[in-house]
Amino acid sequence: TSDNGRFLRYWNEVEFQRIGLCMSTRTDAKQSGRKWFPLTKGGAVRKWYGNNEYVVNWEDDGREMLGYAAKLYGSPTRTVKNMDFYFREGITWSTISNRFSMRFSAAGAISETKGAMCFADSKDDLIYLLGFSNSCLVESFLKVFSPTLDFHEGPFGKLPFIKSRESDTIKSLSNECVSLARADWDNFETSWDFRDQPLLRPGLKGATLEASWRNWEAHCTAAIRQMQELETENNRLFIAAYGLEGELSPEVPEEQITLARADQRKDVAAFLSYAVGCMMGRYSLDAEGLICADAGDTVADYLRIVNEKWGELPEDEDSGITWDEIAFPPDEDAIIPVLEGEWFVDDIVARTRDFLRVTFGEATLKENLRFIEDSLGKSLEKYFLTDFYKDHLQTYKKRPIYWLFQSPKRGFSALVYLHRYTKDTVNTLLNRYLRDYLKKLESRIAHLTQVEATANTTKEKTAARKEREKLEKALKDCQDWERDVILPLAQQRLEIDLDDGVKVNYLKFEGGVAKIPGLAAKED
């Protein structure tokens, strides 16, 4: 691209309706009018399918990128190459990695230097080549052809390739591996094909959250065992085809299987992330996949999209799904307070309890809260105050979609959903939440002052004094933040453009949002 910061985005950053998926040709892509298209860009060691994280600006057949390259180098094809292969299905690998791993790439993607691609004249040949590429033979061959960690196109092109008499079996094995890996990739919200939370999925959901996680654990273990058997058989067939019995072993160690492992803390954090997504309207318990994922989406858009996914376009008040039938309605303004103590009805802890009531029922609420807190190693409130945003930044690789507005000393915090942001969002944050919170703090401080003056015991006086002093510090922190940062931001009524990406937009709110270490660093 010559400038990744300019032309690449994580797919979560931009408007979903602006992403063109499943395009077959450059002509299709151009006629779609979309701006962003999937990009293969390497990534972590992962076999068969996955690492679909990036999109690239190829609007109007790459007009901006080609013009940029021509301006820099005098010729666009100095850097933008092999355009005839754009959007063709192929197989892709990470050219810089500690282990070679090949993945199927469906039609619709463009390749980048760190996510090289290989093509074939037929789907059968491609799937066979995928099986070959993920066999232990290729791993051994590449130790000769590329003893470093650079698996570029040269060494790959030198691999000795033959067709086995068992090619039909190999293709069947490869297809099974792709299906397993794809289902695994789509279990997580960083996939654009994510449909639902596994712990709430029919067949996995139990009577309690813990029972659901136990089912998920068994599911992951079974998938890993199945993949291990498939990869071992794939190795055995290629070892036989090359006459290398006795030289290479077909067995695949479990640690080399690149599917998700059940992890209690991580999986519960993902469940809570999905719950927050439902609060924000990004997801819904009433329909699969993304709901509100475009700029400025509202609760009205939420209801419309849920109805569209049900295939019921409401033409009048008596048709389609109504608000009364929505299992867990999204927050009206996509602002969720994250505070110590429940000061608002839509506080994140209160809404999480509501989410658990809806998904598992009132009777198991205490049990489910206990399981969550045991899994996290801390209270639910403490997790949201200290760890949730860290986990969110890790999941979305420092490009958060829920932004943490936070005062310098953390006296006030609230999450805001990027895709539902409007130029009045900060004003709403200021008037509906921050100023209301200041009034509540002042009232509570006055009450504690009275308690301190009239308490009958030293213990009561001390408790009141300590809480009062703590709240006074929070009040001062929030008052200063309101005056110096939030009020000026609210008055500016800043507009954002999702096409610019999180990095550009987030830095506009400096002082108002929590700092993200390394966000201002230059793109690779």
Image (cartoon, rainbow, N blue to C red):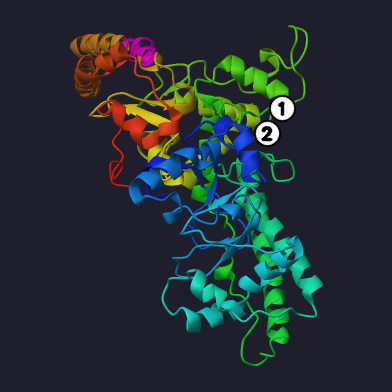
Residue 94 in percent (x, y) is at 50, 63
Measured along the vertical axis of the image, is residue 309 above or below residue 56?
above
* Amino acid type shown at disc 1: Lys
Residue 241 in percent (x, y) is at 72, 84
Report the residue marked by disc 2.
Answer: 288
Measured along the vertical axis of the image, is residue 92 above or below residue 170?
above
What is the C-alpha distance between the residues marked 1 and 2? 8 Å
Query: Which residue does the image show at 34% across and 33% down from the upper left?
Result: 504
In front: 238, or 377? 238
Tell me which segment is drawn in magenta: 427-437
Report the residue marked by disc 1.
Answer: 309
Task: Please identify the residue farthest to the front as the structure is shown.
Answer: 74
Q: Which mark is residue 441?
A: none
Crowding at dot 1, Cα within 10 Å, few <14 / some 14-19 / many 20+, comes out as some
Task: Mark 1 vs mark 2: give the one in front.
Answer: 1
Residue 398 in view of the camera: no
Residue 427 in view of the camera: yes
Q: Earlier in the sequence, mark 1 or mark 2?
A: 2
Residue 232 in percent (x, y) is at 68, 75
Q: Main secondary structure of the magenta part?
A: helix
Local SS, label 1: helix
* Amino acid type shown at disc 2: Glu
Local SS, label 2: loop
Query: Which residue does the image show at 77% across and 24% down from the upper left?
Result: 311
Crowding at dot 2, Cα within 10 Å, few <14 / some 14-19 / many 20+, comes out as some
Left or right placement of residue 277 versus residue 418 in this view:
right
Q: Are the residues flagged by discs 1 and 2 in contact, CB closer than 8 Å? A: yes
Residue 157 in percent (x, y) is at 56, 74
